[in-house]
Image (tube, helix red, strand yellow):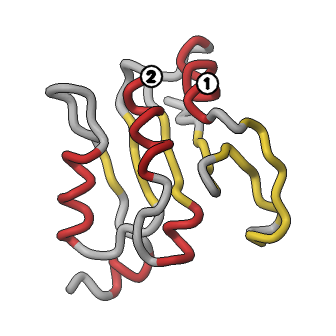
Amino acid sequence: MIVIPAIDLKDGRCVRLKQGRMSDETVFSDVPEEMAVRWYEQGAERLHLVDLNGAVQGEPVNMAAIKRIVASIPIPVELGGGIRDMPTLEAHHYRYRRPGRPCRRRGLDRRGRSDPG
């Protein structure tokens, strides 16, 4: 079994929402790439990122934080949140990458799975 740690991003910070409410958050770090490095140093083989703002707004929002995270660790990164159609999915395959290493997995949000348009 592979455990895949996740970092939830809201307003560029690493957070946890209480019962999924955007208005009720616990901030774990204002520098999410440091959290990514911590997970990597603790043995993570891949990392899952969730753009919470993107999930709400329907398009990726935390791009700067995601780029910093991807650049800070040498392991594959999965990305979800605000990816609701194939053009956005494909764009993010190349946008968040280290040289020669695209984001390995991206997830279509629920709306994208039911309306692949």
73 displayed left or right of 91: right
In this view, the residue in front, 57 or 7, is 57
Task: Please provide percent x and percent y for residue 100.
Answer: 14, 27
Q: Which residue is mark 2?
A: 72
Q: Residue at x 72, y 49 (%)?
A: 15
Task: Please provide percent x and percent y for residue 102.
Answer: 22, 37
96 displayed left or right of 21: left
The three-letter code of the residue at mark 1 reads Glu
Task: Please provide percent x and percent y for residue 17.
Answer: 77, 60
The answer to the question of whether label 2 and label 1 lie on touching residues, with beta carbons closer than 8 A, is: yes
Q: Residue at x 30, y 42 (%)?
A: 96
When asked about the image quadrant of residue 42, the answer is: top right
Where disc 2 sits, the SS reads: helix
Q: Residue at x 38, y 23 (%)?
A: 75
Against 79, residue 3 (above or below) is: above
Q: Locate the C terminus by quadrant.
A: bottom left
Q: Which mark is residue 94?
A: none
Task: Please provide percent x and percent y for residue 44.
Answer: 53, 22
**Count of residue discs:** 2
Against 79, residue 41 (above or below) is: above
When asked about the image quadrant of residue 98, the answer is: top left
The three-letter code of the residue at mark 2 reads Ser
Q: Residue at x 27, y 36 (%)?
A: 97
Where disc 1 sits, the SS reads: helix
Q: CA distance from mark 2 to mark 1?
A: 8 Å
When asked about the image quadrant of residue 91, the answer is: bottom left
Q: Which residue is mark 1?
A: 34
17 displayed left or right of 113: right
Q: Earlier in the sequence, mark 2 or mark 1?
A: 1
Q: Residues within 10 Å of mark 2 (few under 14, many from 20)?
A: some
